[in-house]
DNA sequence: ATAATAGTGTCTCTCAGACACTATACC
DNA sequence: GGTATAGTGTCTGAGAGACACTATTAT
């Protein structure tokens, strides 16, 4: 198929034709997650086009030829939610043939974490059209499985494509990483109480935690430092406010 | 750009043109890992073509339009190493523009685990041309970073593309999952001694483990069951052979 | 004072690390 | 018997869970 004479790398690259073989389309989907009183919440867009027209979907878009995958995910967040500078991490790549009826689309799933109020500010400021829905996780611990979104009637509302599976993997990842990675602070304001950190963990894990040992291990972790300030407008003793330990370097 | 009249999903799909926008090429790369006396080992192929001609690379290939990503990775293992039926897991997707000088190639990295002897049998039987190299990990714990492969002279040998980074992420993943996932048994024969499990863990983690507590927690984990058989041809007291607990269902 | 939550002190249980000891193979 | 590794029993220290108690705010 190719001549046997040695080629220089320059000659090879000049002769290379990237369109020789058909290849899948490549997209990114971003699960933008925050916490609300009722539990984990994610940002959805209502699809106005086929396929899955009318269904809720995770914000997504095709990967541009010139941008990295991380850049594509960050771009989607700006375009669909008006948000930038939030925690963003690659989750998994979904590539089953048939996951998108149009054509072969391989999608790199990302997740992003943000404090509710920052999300609401960004959505208002950029006037984007999103729906914030509470996630219902029908399994415990890190068993895994799909995640449900409850519609207005209380019945589970179907999601577009394989996005319910993406959210399931996301919750599993969050539950697994929460204990050793500083993820919870991405879901909290700059200054927070120990109780708020515990509530965030409990929301993600879906179970109650022991207050005493949670406080102890959190303080011993070195991840947070006291500010000396306290809550205001409480109807009880105000708790001290902490902040994340400034990252060295 | 599109007419405003409602379309049925069938009409939409019929009119959809997947080649409307250029998109990246999509490949899978598989790090096939085993353990040897000197540490972790991985399977490499010597590139005969540009780019990176002459360098060691992880076995890889482009994703076919009809196969899933998992299937593509399994196919690469069969074609490049003559191996099938081994543990295979998606690692991460690498998509920086410029990671392949030919054109934009996004690669889904996988890793596979196999016992050395099964690997050697498969390589002999299928007469594939691979190089098994010991990995040198220049960092401890789960700090992360690139991984080196030592050449014949003892100096680090450069790898093709970003494959050193893939191996680095792989070692980090293995070290993180080893404690709670039954990965070590994939690197051992069907029947093994407790000492062999510990050695496998020590090779992956890159540090010594406490014998007593390792035995205790391993036996308490329920992941292994004694066979009643014992080692033979030892020059000391023979250890009992265990096997992985048969998976329920 | 009462209600409500923040925060401290201490006991217990579990588990990892350490060490001592016994068991069983080959030489 | 000597050597090497398998395997057991027990002590200790660290950390999680549980509980009792004190502290501080609003009403």
Image (cartoon, coloured by chain):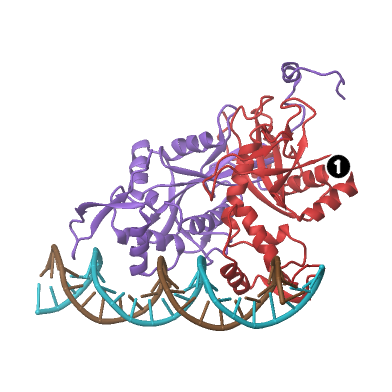
Chain colours: A purple, B red, C cyan, D brown
Q: What is the total number of numbered labels drawn onto the structure image? A: 1
Whole-percent x and y of residue B233? Answer: 82, 67
Depicted B42 relative to depicted A219: above or below: above
Q: Residue at label 1? A: B128
Depicted B106 relative to depicted B70: above or below: above
In the figure, residue A102 lies in which quadrant?
top right
Question: Which residue is painted at 72% across and 33% down in the image?
Answer: B153
In the figure, residue C13 lies in which quadrant?
bottom left
Residue B218 at least partly seen: yes
Whole-percent x and y of residue B189? Answer: 77, 62
Residue A97 at least partly seen: no
Whole-percent x and y of residue B226? Answer: 72, 75
Label 1 Cα neighbours within 10 Å, binned few <14 / some 14-19 / many ≥20: some
In the figure, residue B239 lies in which quadrant?
bottom right
Residue sitting nearer the eye, B70 or C8 = C8
Question: If the image is split into quadrants, where does the C terminus of chain A sit?
Answer: top left
| A43 lies left or right of D18 | right
| B219 lies left or right of B144 | right
Residue sitting nearer the eye, B32 or B101 = B32
Question: If the image is split into quadrants, where does the N terminus of chain A sit?
Answer: top right
Residue sitting nearer the eye, A248 or A104 = A248
Q: Does dot 1 land on a helix, a strand or a loop?
A: loop
Residue at mark 1: chain? B
| A195 lies left or right of B46 | left
Whole-percent x and y of residue B29? Answer: 70, 41
Question: Which residue is painted at 36% across and 49% down in the image?
Answer: A115
Residue sitting nearer the eye, D12 or B56 = D12
């Amino acid at each position: 198929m190719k001549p046997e004479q040695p080629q220089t790398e320059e000659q090879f690259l000049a002769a290379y034709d990237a369109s020789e073989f058909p290849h899948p389309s490549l997209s990114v989907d971003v699960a933008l997650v925050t916490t609300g009183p009722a539990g984990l919440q994610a940002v959805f867009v209502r699809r106005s086009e086929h396929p899955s027209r009318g269904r809720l979907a995770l914000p997504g878009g095709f990967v541009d030829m010139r941008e990295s995958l991380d850049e594509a995910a960050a771009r989607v967040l700006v375009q669909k939610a008006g948000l930038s500078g939030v925690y963003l991490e690659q989750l998994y790549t979904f590539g089953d043939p048939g996951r998108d009826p149009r054509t072969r689309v391989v999608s790199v799933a990302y997740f992003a974490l943000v404090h509710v109020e920052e999300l609401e500010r960004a959505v208002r400021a950029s006037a984007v059209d999103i729906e914030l829905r509470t996630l219902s996780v029908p399994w415990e611990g890190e068993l895994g499985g799909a995640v449900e979104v409850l519609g207005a009637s209380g019945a589970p509302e179907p999601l577009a494509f394989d996005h319910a599976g993406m959210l399931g993997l996301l919750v599993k990842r969050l539950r697994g990483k929460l204990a050793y990675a500083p993820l919870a602070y991405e879901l909290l304001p700059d200054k927070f109480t120990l109780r708020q950190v515990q509530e965030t963990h409990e929301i993600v894990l879906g179970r109650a935690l022991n207050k005493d040992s949670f406080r102890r291990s959190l303080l011993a972790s070195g991840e947070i430092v006291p500010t000396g300030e306290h809550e205001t407008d409480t109807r009880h003793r105000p708790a001290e406010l902490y902040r994340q330990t400034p990252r060295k370097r």
